[in-house]
Image: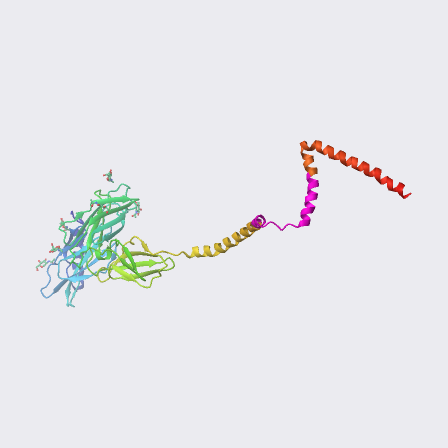
Amino acid sequence: MAVPAAAPLPCSLLLVVCWVVAMGTAAGAKILPSPSNLNYSFIHICTLNWTWNPPENISSSCNLEYSSDIVINGVPEDRKKWGKNRFRVTDVHLNEEMHLRVRSECKNDTTSEPSPWVETSLLPKGIPGTAAVDLSCVWHNLEYMACTWRPGENASSDTNYSLFYWFDGLENPKKCSNYSVDQEIFECIFNLTFPKVTSNYPTISILIRDDSEEIRPVCASKNPTTLVKPATPRQLTLSKTNDRIDVKWSASETFPKNCLHYEVKWGNGDSDSVWISEINSVSIPGIDANSKYTFKVRAKPKRECYNSDFHSDWSEEKSIGEKRDSTIYVVLIITIPLVVAVSTIILLAYLKRLKILILPPIPDPREILKRMFGEQNEDSQSSAKYDPMNAFDRLIIEEEIHSLILTETSDSTNPEKENR
Ligand SMILES: *[C@@H]1O[C@H](CO)[C@@H](O)[C@H](O)[C@H]1NC(C)=O
Ligand SMILES: *[C@@H]1O[C@H](CO)[C@@H](O)[C@H](O)[C@H]1NC(C)=O
Ligand SMILES: *[C@@H]1O[C@H](CO)[C@@H](O)[C@H](O)[C@H]1NC(C)=O
Ligand SMILES: *[C@@H]1O[C@H](CO)[C@@H](O)[C@H](O)[C@H]1NC(C)=O
Ligand SMILES: *[C@@H]1O[C@H](CO)[C@@H](O)[C@H](O)[C@H]1NC(C)=O
Ligand SMILES: *[C@@H]1O[C@H](CO)[C@@H](O)[C@H](O)[C@H]1NC(C)=O
């Protein structure tokens, strides 16, 4: 990777050194000369090797060490280091201004003062606000890493960000090739597996940049053990024996033994419980035979193995048992007496009519006689009234009655004559 040289640096550095030397001689104090030729080079996509040369004319009595520190966006990081090495390796973020400063010191020598700091800087390239933001990565099932990010607010909407990654063990950085974009969220997925015996995973360096000079690159270091997310448990099976329910699911094929535990969430609708299981099964005692139980499981990495807060998604939900719905009981308790009451009333009313049909009221002979004659008169009259065939008969009867009345009236006058 090309290393941009800080062109004005040697001059300014020289000035500082000259000035310090002059001051030192003027005051008569023994101020050490500064290291020279401070420079840097990339050793990986997101890693710099800062190098410098030893100061000149250091007396052999001086136990020379170099003190170095990092300043980011003008703020000292307080990551001071002392040592005899003439280089320092640091991670870089590329989207911020980074300075490294170094000076020489004689250890355990009170007669000399540390040299002034010499400094060199790494300035961000591209336009401010175009670097990818909100980078986050998840290591799925120890199999593949999925990283997502959003475009910077000043980046054009068709920016083609590319993701590169590197870790100790890879000869060269690799370019991620499985991209997707959904609602301005970029995602790239790359395989990431290590031998099962490994317990120390290397830090993953991730660089997101664009081929265009305008897009500011950005680097991030990810510790994979903090990003572990297990796969969703599969093949959840339930079986019931007496008052126990046995729950089983498939064991992970990618995780080392004893590095996962499982959360079993189960309930019968009234209450939910969570059981933690160290193995891929659990047996739950004391269950209610008249309840329906629902189960789901998710996996969590164990702290002893991974420092990750992610857990798997919940498995599909499975249930066992028949639920006697209490609301049905309530409905039954209300409706049964209601139905009984209503049908009794209907039955009684019906029975009353039925009784009339089966057991007609005991006839009263007087009534019958009365009705027979009364009704016959009425009948003859009414029937005559309405039957045209009887019109002639009626006429005869009426004549007879009239003649009868006549004879009667003629007779009735006679007793008066007899009494006289
Ligand atoms: C820094 O190192 C690069 C090569 O890695 C070189 O081209 C450049 O001139 C050096 N800069 C200084 C100030 O020495
Ligand atoms: C950094 O550069 C120095 C000088 O070139 C070299 O001796 C050292 O091994 C480098 N460090 C790493 C970690 O590459
Ligand atoms: C270092 O010492 C030599 C000889 O003693 C002298 O010629 C030279 O100017 C000194 N260099 C500096 C930077 O003081
Ligand atoms: C985006 O660009 C504008 C104008 O150049 C600038 O003021 C702003 O700070 C940039 N946004 C970011 C996040 O840097
Ligand atoms: C991104 O890629 C697409 C398709 O390759 C291209 O049309 C577009 O111009 C690119 N965007 C930029 C900013 O280069
Ligand atoms: C890309 O990722 C998707 C989603 O995980 C996966 O289904 C697909 O197989 C991957 N393609 C390649 C070429 O790796």
Q: Where 403 falls versus 210 (above or below)? A: above
Q: Is residue 277 at all visible to an observer of this figure?
A: yes
Q: Residue furthest right?
A: 420
The one nearer the camera, 22 or 358, is 358
Which region is colored magenta? 353-379
Most common secondary structure along the magenta stretch:
helix
* Image quarter of the C terminus: top right
* In the image, residue 280 lies in the stretch drawn in magenta: no
Please provide percent x and percent y for residue 340: 50, 54
Q: Is residue 14 at all visible to an observer of this figure?
A: no
* In the image, residue 363 lies in the stretch drawn in magenta: yes
**Along the horizontal axis of the image, is 44 left or right of 396?**
left
Count the labels in the image.
Answer: 0
Q: Indicate the colouring scheme.
A: rainbow
**Along the horizontal axis of the image, is 263 left or right of 397?**
left
Please provide percent x and percent y for residue 160: 24, 42
Q: Residue furthest front?
A: 418
Q: Residue sitting at 43 percent across and 55 percent down?
A: 328
Please provide percent x and percent y for residue 87: 14, 57
Q: Where 406 falls versus 210 (above or below)? A: above
**Along the horizontal axis of the image, is 196 left or right of 374?**
left
The one nearer the camera, 325 or 212, is 325
The one nearer the camera, 186 or 124, is 186
The one nearer the camera, 144 or 153, is 144
Please provide percent x and percent y for residue 82: 17, 62
